[in-house]
Image: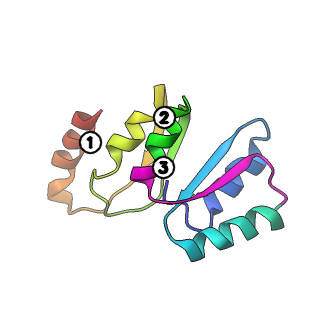
Amino acid sequence: MFSGVSPYSIVIAKNCKNCEIYSIELNRAATKYAFLNKDLNGVRNMEVIQGDVKKVIPKLIMNGMKFDFIVMPRPQLKDSFLKQAFDVAKHGTRIYYYDFCNEEDLQRIIKNTYACA
């Protein structure tokens, strides 16, 4: 999710040849460069999807897709996309999600994140 020009997706795809990687990005220009990045790196096990995560995820669900790992490298989204991540997560999926906050808000954010699960 929020893959930009797909740097994380490329590294994962190159290091896990038997994995299928789905790279979702809303920004059309970034998606264009994600396709170029994929081609320049010779990556074959990655699909680049241009679109809004909140619209793409339901389509993946309809196709019965669930994922072992979900990378969400975009800070300051609060928990606005965690529902979509949980919707396509298998039991035991690792979700890599990060946020910025003030230290005094940390425990509240952790509690709210786990409540979404």
On the image, the x and y values in percent for residue 103 come to 20, 59
Q: Residues within 10 Å of mark 3 (few under 14, many from 20)?
A: some
Amino acid type indicated by mark 2? Ile
Q: Earlier in the sequence, mark 1 or mark 3?
A: 3
| Disc 1 from disc 3: Cα separation | 22 Å
Considering the numbered disc 1 on the image, is that residue within a helix, a strand or a loop? helix
On the image, the x and y values in percent for residue 96 come to 46, 46
Q: Earlier in the sequence, mark 1 or mark 2?
A: 2
Asked if residue 88 is positioned above or below residue 33 in the image, the reply reads above
Task: Name the residue tied to disc 3.
Answer: 56
Question: With 60 as the anchor, is 31 left or right in this view?
Answer: right
Is residue 8 or residue 24 the one in the foreground? 24
Amino acid type indicated by mark 1? Thr
Task: Name the residue tied to disc 2.
Answer: 61
Task: Name the residue tied to disc 1.
Answer: 113
Q: Is residue 52 magenta?
A: yes
Mark 1 or 3: the one toward you: 3
Is residue 77 or residue 114 the one in the foreground? 77
Amino acid type indicated by mark 3? Val
Q: Is residue 47 magenta?
A: yes
Considering the numbered disc 3 on the image, is that residue within a helix, a strand or a loop? helix
Which residue: 63% across, 62% down?
6
User: Which residue lies most toward the top here?
Assistant: 91
Q: Earlier in the sequence, mark 2 or mark 3?
A: 3
Mark 1 or 2: the one toward you: 2
Is residue 92 or residue 104 the one in the foreground? 92
Query: Magenta part of the protein: which range?
Result: 42-56
Which residue: 49% across, 53% down?
1
On the image, the x and y values in percent for residue 73 come to 47, 58
